[in-house]
Image: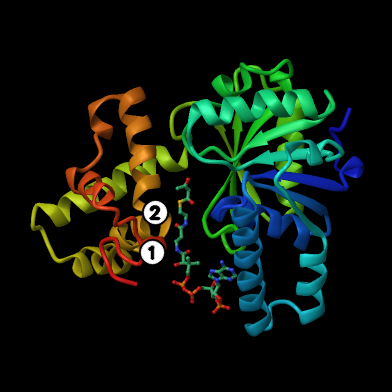
Amino acid sequence: MARSLDSIERIGVVGAGTMGSGIAQVAAQSGYDVVMRDIEEEFVQNGFDSIESSLDRFVSKDKIAEDEAEATLDRIAGTTELSDLADCDVVIEAAVEDMDIKQDIFADLDEEIPDDVVLATNTSTLSITTIASVTDREESIVGLHFMNPVPVMKGVEVVVGEKTDDEVVEFAHALAEDLGKETWESDDKPGFVTNRILMPWLNEGIRAYDEGVASKEDIDKGMKLGTNVPMGPLELADHIGLDICLDASETLHEELGDRYKPAYLLKRKVDAGDLGKKTGKGFYEY
Ligand code: CAA
């Protein structure tokens, strides 16, 4: 059974977007061989580009040496084939936040990857238990919810599904710690700890702006200086991506009721295609 870190040499990552490439990077920086898979060559290449630019930032700040950055990149292989993850000792899925897509991926992983391998999901709001239900290894499926930007953020949320084995939960904590992170644990309830609390905070910031309580700058400044957080709600929503905030808020709204209703202005911005930093415009311009 691949439950001890000693038996882990190669980590598979499904998805090369912001989260997947960040997870691949920290795994490779921690000395693991990594196979990073996305559905198109272009997405895999984008993943490598963002890893390179993150490593460059660390090098320019003297946080890591140039040869360490090169060695990190050398440890990551890119692929578009899920079957290339077959010899991985653990797989972390970080594809889009869509239950049907995640279930399809997990059904395929269940076929391709040996039965004793732990399959983790980086889902930020969807149920681990529902994702796991399409596999024949529900006990080996666990949530490993990294924070954005993954290479910088210290925390990882370990999410325990209805059928997740205690041994797998312990393994998930140990793995995240080995990737240089600190962990906390959440039951498989909508939004877990972080997004259950963060999403209403972001939506309330957006509503306060929409209802004219203060300018966006003053809302962000007030929350930063008033509560000592690194980013105010509007800049943090832009950083996360307004589409991601809306998806997460809609899932919470569906599961937990009206107190999680997404702000109207959040929907309007997403409909307009202004998704935050990644599109150059959200509440602010970049
Ligand atoms: N790779 C490498 N280094 C990076 C980086 C990256 N991707 N992003 C930032 N950095 C480094 C910078 O180079 C800088 O290094 P120094 O301290 O050595 O100068 C440091 O991180 C700080 O960055 P900046 O100076 O550019 O800017 P900043 O001080 O504003 O920090 C931040 C940026 C780390 C993002 C900080 O603003 C922050 O912590 N913001 C809050 C982020 C947050 O809350 N994330 C969680 C979102 S919720 C989530 O992810 C869950 C979900 O499911 C939605």
Which residue type does callout 1 highlight?
Lys
Which residue type does callout 2 highlight?
Gly
Nearer the observer, 2 or 72 = 72
* Residue 113: image location, x then y, percent: 80, 30
* Residue 12: image location, x then y, percent: 75, 44
The residue under the point 75% across, 73% down is 69
User: Is disc 1 in contact with disc 2, using a CB cutoff of under 8 Å?
Assistant: yes
Nearer the observer, 111 or 140 = 111
Q: Quadrant of the N terminus?
A: top right
Q: Is residue 254 visible?
A: yes
Nearer the observer, 45 or 142 = 45
Q: What colouring method underlies this structural image? A: rainbow
> Where 26 sits versus 106, above or below?
below
> Where 220 sits versus 200, above or below?
below
Q: Which mark is residue 241?
A: 2
Whole-number angstrom distance, CA of label 1 to CA of label 2: 7 Å
| Disc 1 C-beta below 8 A from ligand 1 | no
* Residue 28: image location, x then y, percent: 77, 59
Q: Which image quadrant for residue 117?
A: top right
Q: Which residue is the site of mark 1?
A: 277
Give the side of residue 201 with respect to residue 33, left or right: left
* Residue 86: image location, x then y, percent: 83, 36
